[in-house]
């Protein structure tokens, strides 16, 4: 399928989200809750060389982010990656990628809320049940503001992202006086294998570029806004993680801290009086910001899946540009509630949920990059980034290994739906005389 043919199948959109709000949504989707724990975890497995891991993953994320930007700017639609896959690989593949994101990646929602609750309780104190209560409270504001559409939630996101970046700058600034040059020696305490382990950790820190593709139709002048917003987000997220990694090593050394909330160890070194409140504020802003960025992505995708026949048609209301997919948002709330209850019943064991989330995300990336190779103009910069991304994602699929069982089950469900729909269509056709 040629790019021109594919373009003709997607309605050109002119949304109301400008560059700053678009960039803030990208930053929130990518920066994520990893900022709370990953710098310390990376320092423990790689020591000072974890700084190299940040730089490596930042460079590796550029072709992936660039490919999604090229696709979203050319084919802005609520279906996001599912739309790209439909145009390039057909309906069944699109159904698979849609299910992977809507039902699989969505598992990460409760994880974000609980992580925020755990950080607040660990920083400020309180019983374990308070983690669940705070998690519920963290969920509510993003759902409420997204019920009013992206014009409201995008403005809220701009404020949240601005506050988050100011707090990160503050944390780095107050931590610098406690830095010790001796903490950078030895630079490779665990060898290059440790750097490899740190890279694996930071891969997930730089994921999330696919989420904003679902709201690309709401951006003003997507061809210009999306590439610029992506570039701003890459630079912002990279600088934030690099700065935090440097000060984490410089202040805490290879241990990366000793508590369950390592960011608290960092700020308490130079701000023992109010460090806990700073960390609690960061956790709250991060969790709400991530949910506020992902909820419209899930809702828009749900509406698009209803429009394209992959989910019940009544959920499709709001799939058009400028509309608010409130019915789909309600379904997203129901799905997240089920996952939240299961997570609580599991004793708040986050690991299985994180693995499902990441394996489904990698599966979405795989089909999305294959679609990009077919849709983007051959030999263009975007096409070359897509080719490089296919190779990178193949490596991520290998790392995912047995955890791909959930994406495989969702793909099987997509195939079953295709078979049922084809049989229903044949049954509805008049029989020949």
Image: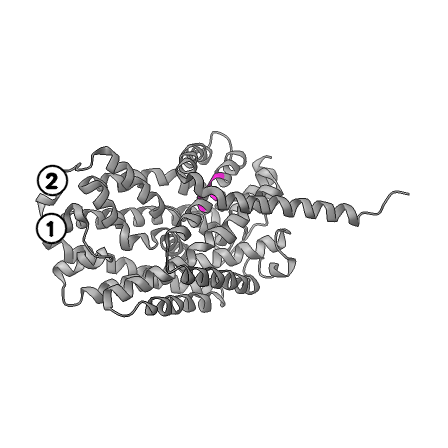
Residue shown at 34% from the left, 64% from the top: 159
Residue shown at 18% from the left, 42% from the top: 48
Residue shown at 54% from the left, 47% from the top: 410
Residue hosting label 2: 185
> Does the magenta-highlighted stretch encompass residue 364?
yes
User: Is 64 situated left or right of 430 in this image?
Assistant: left
Callout 2 touching callout 1 (CB < 8 Å): no
Q: Is residue 18 visible?
A: no
Callout 1 crowding tier (Cα within 10 Å): few <14, some 14–19, many ≥20? some
Q: Relative to 308, say whether 279 is above or below.
A: below
Ranked by sequence position, the earlier of labels 2 and 1 is: 1
Q: Main secondary structure of the magenta part?
A: helix
**Magenta range:** 361-366
Residue hosting label 1: 179
User: Is 165 situated left or right of 384 in this image?
Assistant: left
> Does the magenta-highlighted stretch encompass residue 225?
no
């Amino acid at each position: 399928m040629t790019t021109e043919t594919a373009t003709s199948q997607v309605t050109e959109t002119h949304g109301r989200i400008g560059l700053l709000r678009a960039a803030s949504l990208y930053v929130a989707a990518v920066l994520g809750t990893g900022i709370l724990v990953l710098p310390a975890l990376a320092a423990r497995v790689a020591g000072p060389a974890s700084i190299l891991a940040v730089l490596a993953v930042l460079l590796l994320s550029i072709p992936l982010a660039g490919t999604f930007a090229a696709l979203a700017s050319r084919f802005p639609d609520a279906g996001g990656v599912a739309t790209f896959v439909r145009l390039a690989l057909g309906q069944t593949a699109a159904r698979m990628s849609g299910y992977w994101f809507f039902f699989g990646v969505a598992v990460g929602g409760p994880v974000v809320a609980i992580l925020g609750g755990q950080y607040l309780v660990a920083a400020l104190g309180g019983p374990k049940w308070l983690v669940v209560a705070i998690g519920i409270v963290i969920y509510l504001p993003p759902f409420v503001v997204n019920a009013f559409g992206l014009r409201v939630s995008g403005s809220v996101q701009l404020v949240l992202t601005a506050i988050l970046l100011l707090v990160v700058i503050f944390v780095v600034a107050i931590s610098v006086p406690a830095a010790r040059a001796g903490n950078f020696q030895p630079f490779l305490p665990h060898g290059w294998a440790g750097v490899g382990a740190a890279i694996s950790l930071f891969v997930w820190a730089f994921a999330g570029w696919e989420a904003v593709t679902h709201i690309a139709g709401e951006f003003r002048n997507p061809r210009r806004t999306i590439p610029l917003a992506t570039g701003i987000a890459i630079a912002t997220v990279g600088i934030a993680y690099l700065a935090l990694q440097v000060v984490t090593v410089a202040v805490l050394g290879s241990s990366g801290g000793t508590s369950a909330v390592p960011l608290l160890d960092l700020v308490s070194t130079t701000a023992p009086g109010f460090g806990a409140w700073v960390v609690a504020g960061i956790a709250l802003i991060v969790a709400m910001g991530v949910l506020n960025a992902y909820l419209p992505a899930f809702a828009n995708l749900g509406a698009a899946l209803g429009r394209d026949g992959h989910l019940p048609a009544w959920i499709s209301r709001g799939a058009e540009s400028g509309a608010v997919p409130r019915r789909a948002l309600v379904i997203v709330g129901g799905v997240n509630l089920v996952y939240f209850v299961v997570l609580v019943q599991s004793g708040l064991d986050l690991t299985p949920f994180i693995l499902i989330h990441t394996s489904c995300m990698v599966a979405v990336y795989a089909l999305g990059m294959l679609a990009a190779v077919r849709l983007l103009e051959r030999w263009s910069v975007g096409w070359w980034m897509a080719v490089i991304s296919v190779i990178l994602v193949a490596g991520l699929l290998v790392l995912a290994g047995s955890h791909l069982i959930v994406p495989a089950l969702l793909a099987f469900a997509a195939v079953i739906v295709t078979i049922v729909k084809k049989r229903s269509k044949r049954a509805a056709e008049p029989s020949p005389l």
